[in-house]
Image (cartoon, rainbow, N blue to C red):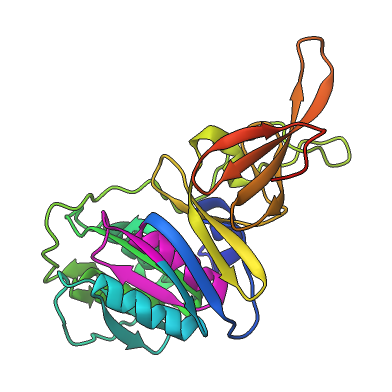
Amino acid sequence: MVLRSLVFCVLSWFLQSPCLAQDGSKPLRVNVKNVYVQGLLGLSANVAQKNAAIGGYSVHRMSMVGEFSDERAFFDAFARQVDARVVRHEQAEVFVGPCIPSQPLRRQSFGTIPVSLNFARVNTVEVLTLMQGMDPSRGAEPPPLPDLAFGLIGLRLKDVGVSSVVEIVSIASGVEIVDGRSGLSVRRQADCGPEPVTSQEIFHPSLRLKKCRPVEGAPKRCEPLELYRLENIVMRGWLLHGARRIAVAETPDGLTWGIQVGDYLGEHFGKVVAMDEQGLLVREVLENPYGFWYEQRIAVGFDNVRRPVLDHEPPP
C-alpha cells in the first residue's frame, strides 16, 4: 500500500532530534563550535518550524556565535558565513553551496501527496527513490536509479507535496531530474569533489528495543539518544530560541541532534534535568554490585568535560 503521508515527528524522533515545536518568530542566540553545516541548518529550521534544504556541504563544518533578532536574521547570517546561495522555492528555502550550478526549475508531476522529511545528511538517490514509490501511477516497484556520486543533502520539510520535494532535491543537489513515465533520469550533476555518498540515515525507522522506562509493566521504546553511550555524545554548543535552550550534540555516526530538558540519553536511563550556558545536568539510574539501584548526576559541559555531581554538591 502506498503511504499517504510520512509523519514528521516520527522521522525526526528517530533520525534527527525530538520535535522542537515553537510558535512565531523569536530571538535566536547561537553558540556552536565545529558542527556540521548541514546539521546546524536542519536543527535550526526544525526549531523555527521552517522548511529548508541544503546541498554542497556534506563534509563541511562551521563555528558560529551570535545573537539574532529572529530566525530570518539567523538564516541570512548563516548563508553569508558559509557562502551559500539561497534559492526560494515556494515550499522551502534552499541553501546551495558554491559547487552547485544554477539551473532552471523543472516542474515535476509526482502529485501532491503530503510528505514530511527530516534528514541532516542523506543521499539524493535515496530521497528520489522514496519519492518514486509515493506515486501510485508508477507501479509498486519503479526502476532503480543509478547510484551516482551526488553527495549528501539536508532536508527539513513538513507537509510538502511529493512533486515539490523532488524539485527541492533537484535544486539542493545540483542535478537536473527528468521525469519519464518509466522512471527518473539525471542529465546533469554538481561537481562538489570527492564528497561521501553514503549516509547513516535511513527511511524506515527500526529501533531495536531495549528495556527503557517501563510503562504499566511493559518496556517502552527508547528515545534515539538512549542507544548511544553518554560518553560518545559530543557537545557542539547550544541554541537559545526565545526562552528555550537547545543543546547541539553530535553522535559517532555524524548526525547532529537537538537536546532539551526532559530528553533521555545514554544507556543508563539518563534524563536531562537542567541546562544552562555551561552544559547539561543528566540524572542516571544504575545498579550497584549488590543489586541495589541508585541515582547519580553527571554534569556534561559544552566543553565536553564530564564529572559526577555528588549528593552534597549543588548542581553546577
Please say whether residue 58 is one of the residues in the magenta stretch.
Answer: yes
Seen at 40% across and 42% down, the residue is 253
Residue 116 shows in this picture:
no
For image coordinates 40% across by 56% down, the residue present is 33
37 left or right of 20 in image:
left
User: Residue 265 appears at what percent x and percent y?
Assistant: 63, 42
**Viewer-proximal residue, 82 or 278?**
278
Pick the residue in front: 299 or 104: 299
The answer to whether 124 is drawn above or below residue 93 in the figure is: above
47 displayed left or right of 64: right
Name the residue at the front extreme. Answer: 313
Q: Position of residue 62 (x, y in %)?
A: 32, 60
66 within the magenta span: no
Q: How many circles with numbers are drawn on the protein?
A: 0
| Residue 136 x/y as whole percent | 43, 70
The percent position of residue 300, horizontal first and vertical second, equals: 59, 42
Between residue 289 and residue 107, name the one nearer to us.
289
Q: Say above or below: 220 vs 80.
A: above
Q: Is residue 256 left or right of residue 22?
A: left
Q: Is residue 38 left or right of residue 17?
A: left
User: Which range is magenta?
Assistant: 35-64
Q: Quadrant of residue 132?
A: bottom left
Q: Residue at x 77, y 16 (%)?
A: 288
